[in-house]
Image (tube, helix red, strand yellow):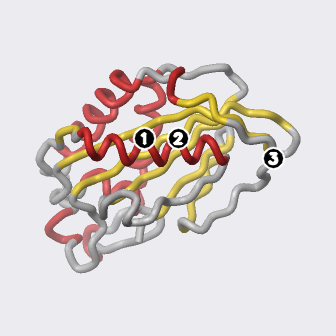
Amino acid sequence: MLINQQRYIGLTLTGLATIVPLVTLNCDVTSAQTINLTTFRSTALSKHNAYRSIHHSPAMTLNNSVNITAQAWADRLAATGTFAHSSSAQRNGAGENLYVYYTTATSITSDNLAKGAIDSWYNEVKLYNYAASGFSSATGHFTQVVWKGSTQLGCGASKGTKTLNGTKFNAFYVVCHYNPAGNVFGKFPTNVLKP
């Protein structure tokens, strides 16, 4: 089971994939055209691998097929204004991390979007208990980022709009898929290593 994270202008809410957005009104998609996907993916890979090296996990490589499933889901989230995980079948059994950044600014740089997402996921490290390693909804993003057995990464990003409590925001959705999937029950001690 993986979790997701929702970010509302400095306030971070974490919960299960069934989390429901506060308000769903006026959602349209501008698509990834405003996001340089080459820069975004390169930065996402670099950030993942930097964090993975701290935990003695091998570097991942970008995989085009995995990029495609992640991008398709990011586009769907942006088009619908929803924030929920794709099905295992939609991502070909890969693991998944989600992130959304709401802002009234018209854009965010592609590298800052990637850094913000991966840093947010990794920051759960401070809550992880290596002595009782296992899945926790508070650390599921972190454990997927550093999961030793995940060797291929695919990421997508897309821009939509979202009206929350009467204010219209630009919503930047980030989806990363991990192959093979991490967060496998019983496999944490050998896949989430202490620095």
The residue lying toward the viewer, choosing from 40 and 57, is 40
* Tag 1: amino acid: Gln
Could you tell me how far apart the alpha carbons at marks 1 and 2 are, in whole angstroms? 6 Å
Give the amino acid type for the residue marked by disc 3 in the picture. Answer: Leu
Residue 138: % across, % down: 47, 64
Question: Label 2 is placed on what type of residue?
Answer: Asp
* Rendered residue at 29%/46% (across/down): 66
Residue 100 placement, left or right of 119: right
Q: Is residue 35 left or right of residue 169?
A: left
Residue shown at 16%/59% (left/top)? 149
Tell whether label 2 touches label 1 (CB within 8 Å): yes
Q: Which residue is mark 3?
A: 25
Residue 171 located left or right of residue 149: right
Residue at 51% x, 46% y: name it. Answer: 99
Task: Give the SS element for disc 1.
Answer: helix
Q: Secondary structure at mark 3?
A: loop
What crowding class fits label 2: few (fewer than 14 Cα within 10 Å), some (14-19), or many (20 or more)?
A: many
* Quarter holding residue 26: top right
Per the image, the residue denoted by label 2 is 75
Nearer the observer, disc 3 or disc 2?
Answer: 2
Q: Mark 1 = which residue?
A: 71
